[in-house]
Amino acid sequence: MSTRVLDSDAIEELLAAFPGRAGIVVKDLLTGTAFTHNADERFPVASVIKLPIMVELYRQIDAGRISLDQRLCLHDGICRFGTGRICTGSVEEFTILELCHLMIADSDDVATDLVTEAIGLDQVNQTMADLGFRDTSVPMSMGRWHYTMAGMADVEINPENDAIVAQDIAAGRIDLEGLPFSASLDNNVSSARDMARMLEQIDAGELISAAASAAMLKMLHACEHRGMIPRDLDADIAIAHKIGQSTGIRADVGIVYGPKPGRLVASLRPVVIAALTRAPEPGTARPGKDLIARIAKHVCSSGSG
């Protein structure tokens, strides 16, 4: 497998056929060769927002403010609706390490909200601003994002209201033009350039610290979702990534390293792919997922080692 960006015309053709908006950055981290498309446009990113939350978590760990061994307990103020295992399980107490793994590997929303409650959304946003990620905004927990989606932005989060939110979202009673689907800084948003630069700094060991970057990279390698960047790639390709999706929102941001050699080796020419999309999804169509998978397939089969 090669991971070199060569044919931007082919990516442009894929984008021209896409029935929505997309923000794309593809960058070969060894040569610096890059392709960009709407890289500075903000998009709603759904669970991709868990990447900046993880960055702030490891900043606080690095500063000694929080420990991976610290235990957090579920309570009724944490929304138990959403993606992941915790909301359907019986375990009520977790370490920060367990929650971070679930947040990234399984995209668990309950785990995410326990983490953000511990570290503070204001601190996440301040760190994003301090690091220069100015298109990245995290004003809402995942629970509040789902409540807002169901038209319950100001309603108290509790088990009874969780059930109403779940019913409304399952029935499609949501406004696809509402705040959770917008590019407003009042929503959980980012840009492809912010996400690509965040990943590049993690790969270089420069985001927060070398130890924090290595820990975050390990978490990203554990992502279990294979429906976008990894979809059309060989199963033995090493990928560190984070996905996000909801109705009309499909996003995947990650680093493709190449065939797994038993350990990661820098000479495998890592490539960052940051792809954020917003498009209509009639019936079972998922054009955003298809676009991201096709871009990744093209990038990872182009050029020579």
Image (cartoon, grey):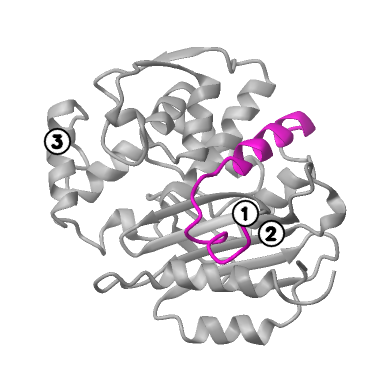
User: What residue range appears in magenta?
Assistant: 209-235
Q: Amino acid at mark 3?
A: Ala
> Which residue lies at the image location 48% right of the left edge and 26% below the top edge?
99
- Does dot 3 land on a helix, a strand or a loop? helix
Q: Are marks 1 and 2 in contact (CB under 8 Å)?
A: yes
33 to 136, vertically: above or below: below
Q: Is residue 150 left or right of residue 240?
A: left
Total residue callouts: 3
- Label 2 crowd (10 A; few <14 / some 14-19 / many >=20): many
Measure how far apart labels 3 and 1 are at the Cα level. Answer: 34 Å
Residue at 43% x, 15% y is: 72
- In percent of width and height, residue 26 lies at 67, 67
- Residue behind mark 1: 254
Residue type at mark 2: give it: Val
Would residue 30 be found to the left or right of residue 170 on screen?
Answer: right
Question: Is residue 218 covered in magenta?
Answer: yes
Residue shown at 37% from the left, 40% from the top: 140
> Which quadrant would the C terminus be assigned to in this image?
bottom right
Indicate which disc, 3 or 1, sits on the residue closer to the N terminus: 3
Task: Kindly report the distance in space between the C-alpha atoms of the residues bearing marks 3 and 2.
Answer: 39 Å
Q: Quadrant of the N terminus?
A: bottom right
Residue kind at label 1, given as amino acid type: Gly
Q: Give 235 or 224, whichever is nearer the viewer.
A: 235
Q: Earlier in the sequence, mark 1 or mark 2?
A: 1
> Which residue bears the numbered disc 2?
272
In the drawing, what numbered circle is on residue 163? 3
Residue 43, by quadrant, is bottom left
Classify residue 103 as left or right of residue 91. right
What distance separates the C-alpha of mark 1 from that of mark 2?
6 Å
